[in-house]
Image (tube, rainbow, N blue to C red):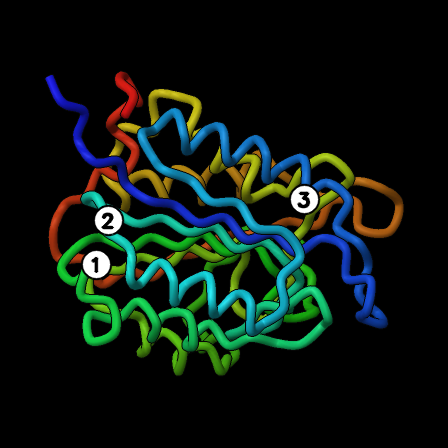
Amino acid sequence: MACPKRNRAVIIVNHQFLQAKGLRPRVGARREADKLFRALSKCNYDVKLFLDLTAKEIEEVYEKESQAEHGKCFVSILSSHGEEGSIMDCQGQALNLTCIYKILSPERCPHLAGKPKIFFIQACRGNRFDDGIYLETDSRAPEEDCFSHYLSIPENTAVMFSCSPGYVSFSNRWESMFLKALLEVLEGEERKLKITKLMTWINWKVAFFCEAKGTEYKGKKEMPCFVTNMVEEVYPFKQDRECSD
């Protein structure tokens, strides 16, 4: 029995920032990247891992993916410093997420037209800290400029962010809260869930069971969130890699 064409995945991790002033090295990101590579490979993905790329190099990675033959689904994990609507390249320059989305749009990437595209983005989206309180209110929440890049998300795409708009995202020398929860999903039975339930599980896990440690940020929380325009049920990690090429 022939092995079906594997889905493709791209992991981009910026962790050194040697030429960027004011951006601290992300010590645990490199080790975390290796774990994500192995986990996605076991879920029948052909995985490409890239470290410390410039904005131009990141765009070139996705341009190459836009020309590749794909299976039923495409997954990408971006891990770096960031701001609302953008991630930082290895030189400290901001790359708008809209640039990445457009490269994989049906017009520029016909091989992925109609196929699910899923992004997991580990990066800060501001400089505020979440105290993690329970709140019931009818008042209007503070307005955030966070919707313009949502509108550029291609059809059949889901994007999950490690934190809410305007807030910081936490990591330490070993791992990040968000990608740790994602890894637990990929390595457990939860990987067989459809994408919306899978992302909701990650939200719950991070929000209720993860908090920052240390004297400076002890007790601070993080709330992942996601946006999706998928119109069908997608089970991106249900298939294990049971055969080889």
- Specify which label sits upstream in the sequence, 3 or 2: 3
Q: Look at the image and tell me in which quarter the C terminus lies.
A: top left
Mark positioned earlier in the residue sequence (1 or 3): 3
At 34% from the left and 28% from the top, the residue drawn is: 43
Q: CA distance from mark 1 to mark 2?
A: 7 Å
Q: Residue at x 70, y 46 (%)?
A: 171
Residue 122 seen anywhere in this rendered image of the structure = yes
Indicate the secondary structure of the residue bearing disc 3.
Answer: helix
Where in the figure is residue 6, as x and y percent of width and height? Answer: 26, 36
Q: In the depicted view, which residue is nearer to us: 51 or 150?
A: 51
Tell me, for residue 70, which label it has, or none.
2
On the question of residue 132 being in view, the answer is no
Between 110 and 165, the residue placed more toward the observer is: 110
User: Considering only vertical position in the picture, is 123 above or below 5?
Assistant: below
Expressed as whole percent of the image width and height from the top left, the position of residue 138 reads 41, 70
Relative to 227, 107 lies left or right: left
Residue closer to the observer: 20 or 65: 65
* Cα distance between the residues tagged 1 and 3: 28 Å
Q: Determine crowd level at label 3: few under 14, some 14-19, many 20+ residues with C-alpha closer than 10 A.
A: many
> What residue is shown at x 71% (from left), y 53% (from top)?
15
Q: Mark 2 falls on what kind of element? A: loop
Amino acid carrying mark 1 in the image: Leu
Q: Which mark is residue 29?
A: 3
- Residue 226: mark in rendering: none
Label 3 is placed on what type of residue?
Answer: Ala
The disc label shown at residue 112, or none: 1
Badge 1 local density, few (<14 within 10 Å), some, or many (20+)? many
| Vertical position of residue 156 compared to residue 166: above or below | above
Please give the name of the residue rendered at 33% of the width and 75% of the height, measured from the top-left corner: 102
Identified by mark 2, the residue type is His
Task: Choose between 26 and 245: the one closer to the eye.
Answer: 245
Tell which tag, 3 or 2, sits nearer the viewer: 2
